[in-house]
Image (cartoon, rainbow, N blue to C red):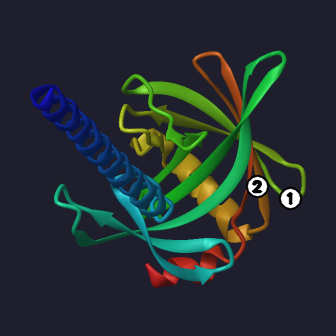
Amino acid sequence: MNNLQNNYFMKKNIWVLLVIVLAFLAFSCKNVNTNADSNSNQSVDSTFVTDSKIVASNWELYNIEDEFGDKTPEKYLGAKGKGSASLDANRDIDVTVYLFIRHDEIFFKFHLNDLQYTSHDNLPITMKIKDGDGIVYSFDLICKNNGEISMRTDKDYKQSQHQFISLLEKGGLLSGATQILGTPYKFKIDVSGYTDAIKRL
């Protein structure tokens, strides 16, 4: 009888210990996920991290991080807008749009439900931009598999690039529309204050 009692209490103690260990592991995992979520709010993705310096209106400075997570001297000027993607006739999802500029580099990043849009490399698209006066311009861009939707820099497209910069210098709210692999996207982004912001880059 004593042996049976000892075995019973031993098994009971093992179960109690196992429950305590599992509860500790669950708590630890929850803390890790919470910390990861709070850190992700500070960055556009794993490379572009805001240094929380709003330089003008809707424009901020963004640092580039290396593969070790350390900030590099490389900076981009960025503005954030909002839009939507039409997945089908009855369903739209929210899209956060980022516009980044550095010297002659100009590109967008689309985030759908906090996930960065990626595409096949070098997929050409046309993006229409409407300024505050209702004038519509068309621009040729390239979708890259790193999530960048870049203004073309070939010499044949320099005039188009200058035209886009002129729109930024004009300022105000820009409306954008494009279609990527059959999915329509539309967005609005405030580029007011660009001429002051670019001086801080």
Toward the viewer: 201 or 55? 55
| Residue 14 screen position, x and y as percent | 20, 38
Task: Identify which amino acid the numbered label 2 is placed on.
Answer: Leu
Crowdedness near tag 1: few (<14), some (14–19) or many (≥20) residues, C-alpha within 10 Å = few
Toward the viewer: 74 or 22? 22
- Marks 1 and 2, the one that precedes in the sequence: 1
Tell me the residue that label 1 is attached to: 132
| Residues under numbered marks 1 and 2 in contact, where contact means CB atoms less than 8 Å apart | yes
Mark 1 lies on a secondary structure that is: loop
Tell me the residue that label 2 is attached to: 174
Is residue 67 depicted above or below 71 in this figure? Answer: above
| Residue 76 screen position, x and y as percent | 42, 67
Q: CA distance from mark 1 to mark 2?
A: 7 Å
Q: Quadrant of residue 189?
A: bottom right
Is residue 191 depicted above or below 45 in this figure? Answer: below
Mark 2 lies on a secondary structure that is: strand
Is residue 161 depicted above or below 80 in this figure? Answer: above
Crowdedness near tag 2: few (<14), some (14–19) or many (≥20) residues, C-alpha within 10 Å = many
Answer left or right for 5 relative to 175: left
- Residue 103 shows up from this direction: no
Farthest residue in the left direction?
A: 3
